[in-house]
């Protein structure tokens, strides 16, 4: 069967339409009228390319801070909604993203839920997020994992606002209809582990001798920025620059060698100064957050200039081409672990 046959819809005649109307009354429908929409020749992207400038979003976030407390809001977050999906609380087909603010002295109460979350810290002078009894001090560039169904609360005992990017697998979880959530009995969960515990136990290439991975999520709760940045730049010294990605690495679950989270893959890439990348596309729609540097990315037919802390999204199977006017580092997240587990993931370096 040729591809064109899959793209073509049969003509609707009055007689056929009358039949379709009768089918509709029996909660039935003709497949041949929708086949091209639901069995697609190539991925039909969910959402459009878009960019959120941190300099524009930060004042809005601070304004939210004057309107509602973290306690009343439960989580004071401005959702980054894909412009093609207003009201859907999603940035891609499977991912939610938002900017969260915790002001000095505030606590976002402890709760847990089946969606998994990551935090990429944009601004902080020493607040914390607590996950499963461990308080993790948040510093800019840190990537923090909140596994599914682990209690977490956020607190700011510093004198400056904390702002971070949240990415959750909420749309995926809700599509599967497996969402559960509950509060911890206490507003702030008890701290049962010393600071830096998970990194000390699991982040140094040594594991407790009897350790067995309990689930697909990394036992390391925080990937600190200074270590990640050093690893990336040290690697870049001895690694050829990929023509699409610059030097790109993925965060790893040290217990399994897989991604740190079962549903969200995370990456860090360095684009050298004056890098002009070739176009690339993959089936995993990807959320990028600029950590350092300046440049622009052509996504489909749109070009977005970016600088530090800007966030942009590349929909599924949409070509993206990065340029950097100075050495730049991009953090990114996608549902690649899910696609790879299902053996559905595809990528293409284009010319
Ligand atoms: Fe949460």
Image (tube, helix red, strand yellow):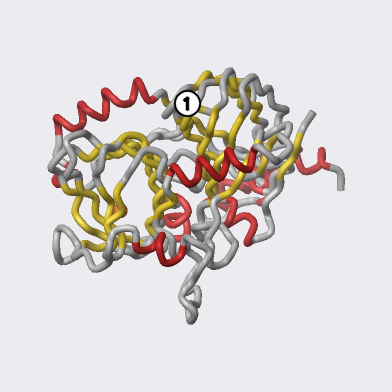
- When asked about the image quadrant of residue 187, the answer is bottom left
Q: Residue 1, image x and y in percent?
A: 86, 48
Left or right, 28 with reference to 237: left
Above/below status of 31 relative to 292: below
Left or right, 183 with reference to 330: left
Give the residue drawn at x 49%, y 58%.
261
Residue placed most toward the observer, 91 or 175: 91
Q: Residue 310, image x and y in percent?
A: 44, 27
- When asked about the image quadrant of residue 54, the answer is top left
> Quarter holding the C terminus?
top right
Give the residue drawn at x 34%, y 36%.
99
Secondary structure at badge 1 equals strand
Crowd around label 1: few <14 · some 14–19 · many ≥20 (10 Å): many
Above/below status of 164 relative to 38: above
Q: Residue 60, image x and y in percent?
A: 27, 25
Residue placed most toward the observer, 116 or 49: 116
Q: Is residue 10 visible?
A: no
Give the residue drawn at x 40%, y 44%.
142
Q: Which residue is mark 1?
A: 51
Residue placed most toward the observer, 101 or 317: 101
Give the residue drawn at x 45%, y 31%.
311
The number of discs equals 1
Left or right, 173 with reference to 183: right
């Amino acid at each position: 069967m040729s591809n064109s046959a899959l793209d073509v819809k049969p003509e609707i005649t009055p007689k056929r339409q009358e039949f379709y109307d009768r089918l509709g009354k029996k909660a039935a429908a003709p497949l041949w009228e929708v086949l091209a929409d639901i069995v697609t020749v190539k991925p039909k992207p969910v959402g459009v390319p878009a960019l959120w400038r941190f300099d524009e979003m930060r004042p809005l976030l601070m304004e939210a801070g004057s309107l509602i407390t973290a306690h009343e809001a439960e989580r004071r977050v401005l959702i980054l909604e894909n412009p093609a999906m207003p009201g859907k609380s999603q940035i891609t087909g499977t991912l939610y993203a938002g900017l969260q603010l915790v002001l000095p002295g505030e606590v976002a109460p402890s709760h847990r839920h089946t969606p998994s979350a990551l935090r990429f810290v944009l601004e902080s002078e020493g607040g914390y997020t607590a996950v499963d009894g461990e308080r993790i001090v948040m510093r800019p560039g840190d990537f923090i994992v909140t596994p599914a169904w682990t209690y977490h609360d956020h607190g700011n005992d510093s004198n400056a606002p904390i702002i971070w990017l949240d990415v959750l697998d909420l749309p995926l979880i809700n599509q599967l209809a497996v969402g559960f959530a509950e509060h911890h009995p206490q507003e702030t969960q008890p701290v049962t582990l010393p600071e830096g515990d998970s990194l000390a136990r699991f982040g140094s290439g040594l594991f407790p001798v009897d350790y067995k991975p309990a689930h697909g999520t990394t036992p390391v709760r925080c990937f600190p920025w200074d270590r990640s940045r050093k690893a990336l730049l040290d690697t870049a010294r001895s690694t050829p620059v990929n023509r699409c990605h610059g030097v790109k690495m993925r965060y790893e679950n040290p217990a399994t060698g897989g991604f740190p989270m079962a549903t969200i893959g995370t990456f860090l890439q360095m684009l050298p100064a004056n890098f002009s990348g070739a176009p690339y596309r993959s089936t995993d729609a990807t959320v990028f957050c600029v950590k350092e540097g300046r440049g622009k990315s052509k996504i489909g037919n749109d070009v977005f200039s970016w600088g530090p802390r800007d966030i942009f999204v590349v929909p599924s199977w949409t070509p993206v081409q990065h340029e950097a006017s100075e050495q730049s580092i991009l953090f990114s997240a996608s549902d690649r672990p899910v696609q790879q587990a299902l053996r559905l993931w595809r990528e293409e370096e284009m010319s």
